[in-house]
Image (cartoon, rainbow, N blue to C red):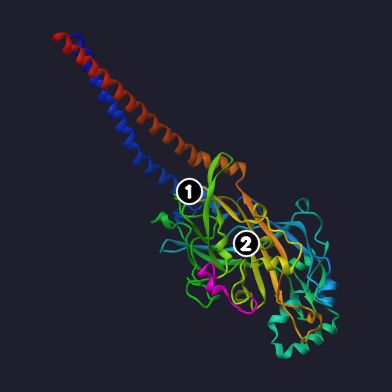
Amino acid sequence: MGCCSARCGLIAGAVLGALIAVLGGILIPVGDSIIRENVVKVRWPAGSRHRNGSTAYENWVSAGAPVYRQFWLFDVQNPSEVVERGAKPVVAQRGPYTYRTRYLPKVNITAFDNDTISFVLPAGAIFEPALSVGPEEDTITALNLAVAGAYSLVPKDVHFFLNLAIKKHNASLFQKKTVKELMWGYFDPISNSTVGLFYPYNGTYDGPYNVFTGKDDIGKVAMIDRWRGERQLNFWNDTYCNMINGTDASAFPPFLDKKPLYFFTSDICRSVAADFQRSVVLKGIELYRYTLNPRTLASPAINPDNHCYCGDPEVTRNCTLAGVLDISSCTGGMPVYISLAHFLYGSEYLTQDVLGLNPVEEEHFTFLDVEPITGMTMRFAKRLQVNMMYGPSKTIDVLKQVKDYTIFPLLWLNETAALDDATADMFKGALTSRVETLEAVQVALLSVGTVAFVLCAVAACVVHRKSRNKLV
């Protein structure tokens, strides 16, 4: 009777353990549903038409964590030798000169019935002396923007008159300007206009962007539907290159699976992809790090998808040039070329034609650190270099000694931001802690239930066997 009672109790324990384990298993899909519901609440635009004033919505509208742009300008060390004897330019980087950007909230926010929301991003830059090597009044010997620009913009058959204008104003291929003038604009007598690397900037805006809210399909959240009212770009003579893919990189659809992420950046007038590299931790939050693939700016010979970005076969040596992107088609014809800092991943002759550059991957690569459950970008560093092209001329005196087309570096920038402590705590409280608690309960139920089932079942078998042996 005692053995039977013990065996029945063990069987009951095994059944109870099995039920506990099953409950833990049931919690997995239920838990996923709870996590998805929390993600919808945390993500900015999902249902934003109905939740204006919510914390998530206000965090999306506001500028959020401080975003800084650090600039390193290239100071020409031998301007006279380049112009008079055709020597290779030697440059030394000066910086950083740091500005706070993206501090203005989104404006003109409008929701539409197709589950999209539109907005514009106002541009603004505030100089940060404490984060800079010197004042904006520091002087730099830099490429003459008007001369280099006019070289491409003015037809060659009227270069004679361009040369007269250059001589009239006693200009040369290089000039001394302050950091502030080079960055934000100065009046140039040759072009009779204001020129500057980022002129105009303050008072302008990027967009409008029209993005999916994810209200009905969270897998489309933050994906760009239109930019400036269009679903396609018009900068490139090719349907593929004109595609607007992915998001604006500030956020991505949730539940990342380590596949490449696609995003559009107006700074370079095209969409790009970033590949998963590794997991990192920021303020106790696990993130996925994505980096630009070296093939992004590879020559069409290496990456055939880039064939439509080759605009001038003569300058790019029959489209074999790697590491730079000619964006003259979206800068009004100005011969501007975008690259990674110090021509990282670029053709060797880029750093052989201009001396003083030293590409280092750890310092000059671009990355995004994205929280995989929500798809929110928690930290990033966008590192780009702005270059201009000039070439030889038989007509323009200051270019007569130039031997070949030269893609000259003007500056490189590091735009960076990271999640602050307050937002990190809020995020962990709103989502991470709940997910971790739910996962802990699931593991505990599965573990306890399974162990109880196995132990009780084994013990019941042992008791049953002993009982049979006694009867024999």
Most common secondary structure along the magenta stretch: loop
For label 1, the residue is 374
Residue 345's tag is 2
Q: Secondary structure at mark 2?
A: loop
Left or right: 4 as drawn, with respect to 282: left
Whichever of callouts 2 and 1 sits on the residue coming sooner in the sequence is 2
Q: Is residue 36 magenta?
A: no
Residue flagged by tag 1: what amino acid is it? Thr
Crowding at mark 2 (Cα within 10 Å: few <14, some 14-19, many 20+): many
For the N terminus, give its image quadrant.
top left
Residue nearest the observer in this picture, 153 or 157: 157
Task: Please tell me whether residue 305 belongs to the stretch shown in magenta.
Answer: yes
Q: Is residue 195 above or below residue 12?
A: below
Q: Position of residue 140 (x, y in %)?
A: 82, 65
Q: Is residue 51 left or right of residue 203?
A: left
For the C terminus, give its image quadrant.
top left
Q: Position of residue 327 (x, y in %)?
A: 62, 72
**Observer-nearest of 326 and 138:** 326
Q: What residue is drawn where x is 74% and y is 77%? A: 148
Which numbered mark, 2 or 1, is in the foreground of this view?
2
Residue at 51 percent of width and 72 percent of height: 242
Q: Position of residue 143 (x, y in %)?
A: 77, 71
| Quadrant of the image occupied by residue 160 | bottom right
Rendering quarter of residue 388:
bottom right
Extent of the magenta region? 300-315
Direction from residue 9 to residue 336 in the image, left or right: right
Considering every residue shown, the one lying at the far bottom of the view is 157
Residue at position x 34%, y 42% from top? 29
| Vertical placement of residue 434 versus 169, above or below | above
Residue type indicated by callout 2: Tyr
